[in-house]
Image (tube, rainbow, N blue to C red):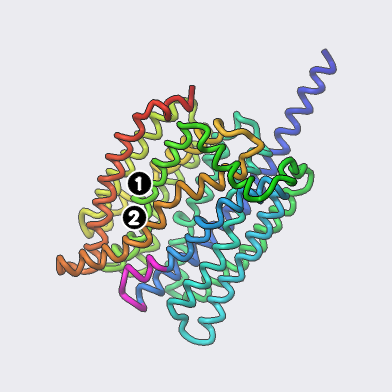
Amino acid sequence: MKRAMSEGCLNTMNNNTNFAKFILLWTGELISSIGGGLTSFGLGVYIFRTTGSAAGMAMVTLFGFLPTLLFSVPAGVLADRYDRRLLMMIGDGFSALGIIFIFLCMITGEASLWQICLGVFVSASFSALLEPAFRATITDLLTKEEYSKASGLVSLAGSARYLFSPIIAGFLLGVSDVKLLLIIDICTFFLTVISAAVVRKGITVRSESAREPFFASMKGGWNAVRGNKGVLTLVMISSAITLFMGMLQILAEPLILAFRDAKTLGIAETVCACGMLVSGLMLGFHGIKGRYVRVLRISLVSAGICMTGFGIIENMIVICIFGFGFFAALPFANNCLDYLVRTNIADEVQGRAWGMIGFLSQIGYVVAYAVSGIAADTLGNLAHAGVGRGSAMVVMAAGICMAMAAVICLSSASIRSLEM
């Protein structure tokens, strides 16, 4: 009995230590998210002021996102073959190179659109190593019971770029310019590398798939997803949802900048993102206890309704109310998606599976980034209402489509079976 009690205490201590390591790693990602949000906000305002077009802003976002799509699958394979914490350090550290390139272009003259696109592409290419390794590390560190809380905190860290960064960037742009935001972002990379280095100690490196051919490992990620019909269906639905969400992500800034200034935009984005803060904190402390598919359906329908309301009128109070509601729904949706997938994928293929899932589910973002800016400019010109109202029309249509997709698709029996 004493031996059993001793082993129980030891397991509890190990769990507490691992959760502390997760918190340290999460803190690094929180800081990185804030820095990235400063750069994203600053470059968006810079491009809109320079070009006056939503298409230019969408192009930069597209080039910043393409590496995530293109490299997520091989990055997932690497996360299963090599030290996941080392991959995180390399991804965070070298992603600073792209931001440094943009900064150098700006201090030697005005950075052109192609230079900004190149810089964000390089930065995002290294950052693509991070996501599968980070998600797989959560599985390494935590127990199944801790997944839901961890997912809530991860959503909160991701929301920091919307919660803290806009208001900070908006005020900083009032006293300086975008170069200051780039400098701050560059500094945050060093802090995140240090946190990953500390967590790296004491975690055994997996090497089970080290002798497996690289492309065979990539195929293994696809097989892990395809082997469960419910997971595959959920991933396909996620791709459609990211299409609609991506349109709001791109067009919210030109929608507001068309009638207000950058400072107001920063405040509005922060107020809206407070919805994600509230939900993220709730999930971080309590998690979701069950009925994940139902919660997922409700949260996505709510998000779609709020997207529709977001573009109704050029009124900051109305925009902030619906924006708050939209962001409040996202952590619940992300938490349910994360849990349903994580608990139905074997631990030994988590890295490559998340890489494949990242590729498939985020194809919608590429489509959104490619067409939303052009659609907003075109509709604004046709209606003689300007790019702001053109953006609003696209966002409202996307919100209606999201709500309808959630109601229809999430009635699938294969998805409901994931939590049985």
Is 58 covered by the magenta stretch? yes
Q: Please indicate whether residue 370 sits to the left or right of residue 354 in the image.
A: left
276 vs 56: above or below: above
Residue at coordinates 39% horizontally, 71% vertically from top-left?
Answer: 45
Instruction: Give the image location of residue 408, x and y in percent.
Output: 30, 34
Query: Mark 1 and mark 2 in contact (Cβ < 8 Å)?
Result: yes
The residue wearing badge 2 is 248
The residue wearing badge 1 is 326
Q: Residue furthest bottom?
A: 108
Any part of residue 134 in sight: no
Considering the whole magenta stretch, tell me its main secondary structure.
Answer: helix
Comparing 215 with 171, the one in front is 215
| Crowd tier of the residue under label 2, counting other residues whose Cα lies within 10 Å: few below 14, some 14–19, many 20 or above | many
Q: Please indicate whether residue 213 sits to the left or right of residue 373 in the image.
A: right
| Crowd tier of the residue under label 1, counting other residues whose Cα lies within 10 Å: few below 14, some 14–19, many 20 or above | many
Q: Residue furthest left?
A: 383
Instruction: Give the image location of residue 90, x and y in percent.
Output: 68, 60
Any part of residue 135 in sight: yes
Q: Amino acid at mark 2?
A: Leu
411 vs 183: above or below: above
Q: Amino acid at mark 1?
A: Phe
Q: Which segment did they paint magenta? A: 50-59
Q: Identify the secondary structure beneath mark 1.
A: helix
Instruction: Find residue 311 and report its image quarter.
Output: bottom left
Q: Residue furthest top?
A: 1
Q: Please indicate whether residue 10 sits to the left or right of residue 261 in the image.
A: right
Q: Identify the secondary structure beneath mark 2.
A: helix
